[in-house]
Amino acid sequence: MSDGAIAGGDSDRGKTFAKLATRPDGVRTGEHVASHLLRQAIRRLQVVSVALVAAVLGTWLPVLLVQGTLVAELRSPDQWGPPVGAVAASLALFAIARSGRFRPSVVVRVGLAYQVVVSFAIALSAYIGAFEGMTASDFTVDRIGMTYVAPWMVFFTVLVPTRPREAFVALTASAAAVPLTYLTLVRAGAAPSLDPGTFTIVLVLPYLVSLVLSYLAARIVHRLGVEVRRAHELGSYRLDGLLGRGGMGEVWRASHHTLARPAAIKLVRRDALGADPAAADLAAARFEREAQAIASLQSPHTIELYDFGTTADGTLYYVMELLDGIDLEELVRRFGPMPPERVVHVLRQACESLEEAHARGVIHRDIKPANIYLCRRALEHDVVKVLDFGLVRHLARPDGAEGRLTRAEVVAGTPAYLAPELALGVDDVDGRADLYALGCVGFWLLTGRPVFEAPTAPALIVAHAREQPPRPSTYTELAVPPELDQIVLDCLAKDPSDRPQTAARLAARLDAVPVEHPWTQERAVAWWTAHRSQEGQPISR
């Protein structure tokens, strides 16, 4: 499936987008980055709270059961209080984070308070009743060791991205849980009093080191989060989700920071253009010219280009309209061949796109069902969009020179839809090659199969160059009007002079095809509604 079939079309170049502190819309990039990190932190808080509940219930209760001390521990609130409190706090945090009723910043601060609460719960669980019969001389690093507060601090900080300053406050409070718990036990007479040196070495210094390491981790995690998010900020657009991969690029669903209009963005990384710098430069130039070609086209049936350019790291990109629909290849595979009147409706619109392109000296060279989208637009249904001008070639530049970059630029196209002159490597090709491919598309729409079938791409190319095509009506049970049958055959003529000479003439012949029941908006709406209901969801992607 082509990149265009996934979301929209293809194109590149314009202004290089820079990572500015403030975008043209006046909104600081950091604000959007922070918002993203907050949402990510909320998702991670849910994970942490569930993990802690599982850890407590999966270790504390089984250990008590194995030791046979469950009943005795349940009789003492000092013993069961801390773990039960940690579980209750975890469940409360999960409910708050999952509810969506609170501002993200509030939820994250609640999460930081939860980190501190759990740290005190761990310290209480470790120290209550642990110092009975001990003297000050028994307090050594080897004997007392460290509680789980230290790994908990690191675990929480690494998993939940938060602002470093806020993380530092929570980490400081968490690190203080152990010495404060000990001092409380001393005042209650449940622990011996230590001299300042021993107290610092055994109960303060280890957690101070953990605090420093955790804070450094917090800064690193936050910085990585910011960098990842900024990598998803393309000028005024934000990448929201990967729609698909194909060829040399990726297509992402994107949204404008201030406008409600969604978009699709195609990215092609420089290293995907080839290891040879010269070949990569040619591919980049082709990508640039493709965007220029699309930007010059104004037909409502050609994918609309919003922006294009190159990032600082050499990634090529262009922003295009996000289509609400399905490509013709996928549509026929899922729902079967189209009735002839609908085929006429679809091909007629594709002709409008190609008519303008050819008039501007641009040929597509990769017309195929996967590069023609059938969409819903506003209140219209079955709107055709031609996209993926990835192999576009200018017939002539304004200065009269040939538009081809170099021989290395020429790419064959898709074998199943390749005009004979392209299959034979003829240099002097024109818009009639696109009309041949459009005839192949019509054959596919009417029959659900390609014009020729062969086990290999070279065999397909030979078939298009030498074999006579069959009539579509021989491969379908639908009542194909003889006029439409002949139009498809004429488009598939080996000699370009035997085909319709322009997209406008082809459109006129399609308009003259007699159909018993014309394809209307009412029928289109009924089809989309019925199939959307059958699927239980929109058929668009």
Image (cartoon, rainbow, N blue to C red):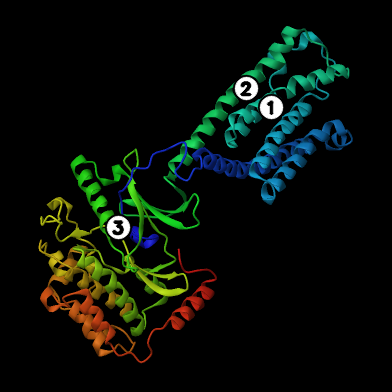
Of the numbered discs 1 and 3, the one sitting upstream in the chain is 1
**Foreground: 491 or 514?**
514
**Foreground: 71 or 273?**
273
- The image position of residue 344, as x and y in percent, is 31, 81
x 36%, y 62%: residue = 5
Left or right relative to 134: residue 263: left
Left or right relative to 257: residue 127: right
Amino acid type, label 2: Ser
| Crowd rating for badge 1 (residues with CA inside 10 Å; few <14, some 14–19, many 20+) | many
Q: Is residue 171 visible?
A: yes
Q: Secondary structure at mark 3?
A: helix
Q: Is residue 495 visible?
A: no
Which picture quadrant has residue 10? bottom left
Q: According to the image, label 2 marks what residue?
A: 210
| Crowd rating for badge 2 (residues with CA inside 10 Å; few <14, some 14–19, many 20+) | many
Q: Nearer the viewer, mark 1 or mark 3?
A: 3
Amino acid type, label 1: Val
Of the numbered discs 2 and 3, the one sitting upstream in the chain is 2
The correct choice, above or below, for 82 with respect to 182 in the image is: below
Residue furthest bottom as drawn: 516
